[in-house]
Image (cartoon, helix red, strand yellow):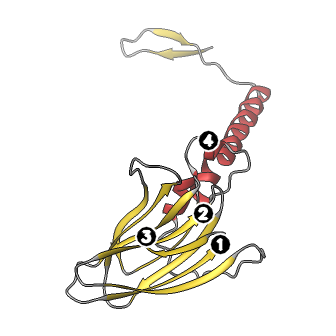
Amino acid sequence: MTESKHSDGTRGEIDVTVQSPATLLKASIISAVLAAAILITVILPAEYGIDPTGAGEAIGLMPLASSTNTDNASEPIETPRDSEWQEDSATIVVPAGKGLEYKFYLVKGEAMRYDWSSTDGELYFDFHGEPEGDTTGYFESYTVSTGDQVRGTFTASFDGTHGWYWKNLSQSPITVTLRTQGQYKVLGIK
């Protein structure tokens, strides 16, 4: 206890609790364990698509990893070392004032790297997926934007078709060059 002087001139005691080094160490260890748990179960799945515990997929964080990396055009697509991966490229012409879809079939958990660009102008696009067997018309959008180049990674959160809907709002055709790598089946223009 320490003594203090109040504004009215009276003196009083202030009760100050000082933590022991053991208590501070215990609090630090608990904080470090909680930070590690959050890193493994939330941050890695949401930011990097890495889910060692399966918790990120269970709470729906895995699609966030693909949407956070879509505009990183300065990094080249690396060649995969896994023999199950394939590499494809396509040139797609989106007619003036029209839209079209280009699709892939992915099994839940399969991954795909992608890089598309257009040199003729920007396109409205919706990167999305439709679950296999769904007859209600449901689809899940991963990225909806306008641009002339996008690069990223994607891990399928369900079995089904995944791909882009591009809409050309200009008065002339726009050519899209799409490069992909991963574990998928190319369905093409739909």
Cβ–Cβ below 8 Å for labels 3 and 2? no
95 vs 182, left or right, is left
User: Where is residue 31 shown, x and y percent of the image?
Assistant: 68, 36
Amino acid at circle 1:
Gly
**How far separated are the C-alphas under marks 1 and 2?**
9 Å
Cβ–Cβ below 8 Å for labels 1 and 3? no
**How far separated are the C-alphas under marks 4 and 3?**
25 Å
Q: In the figure, 33 relative to 85: above or below?
A: above
**How far separated are the C-alphas under marks 4 and 1?**
23 Å
- 152 or 171: nearer the viewer: 171
Q: Residues within 10 Å of mark 4 (few under 14, many from 20)?
A: few
Foreground mark, 4 or 1?
Answer: 1
Disc 1 target residue: 182
Q: Residues within 10 Å of mark 3 (few under 14, many from 20)?
A: many
Q: Which mark is residue 58?
A: 4
Mark 1 vs 3, N-terminal side: 3
Disc 3 target residue: 164
- 9 or 37: nearer the viewer: 37
Cβ–Cβ below 8 Å for labels 1 and 2? yes
Q: Which mark is residue 99?
A: none
Name the residue located 54 percent from the left edge and 62 percent from the top edge. 66
Amino acid at circle 2:
Leu
Residue with the most extreme left position: 171
Mark 1 vs 2, N-terminal side: 2
Disc 2 target residue: 106
**How far separated are the C-alphas under marks 2 and 4?**
19 Å
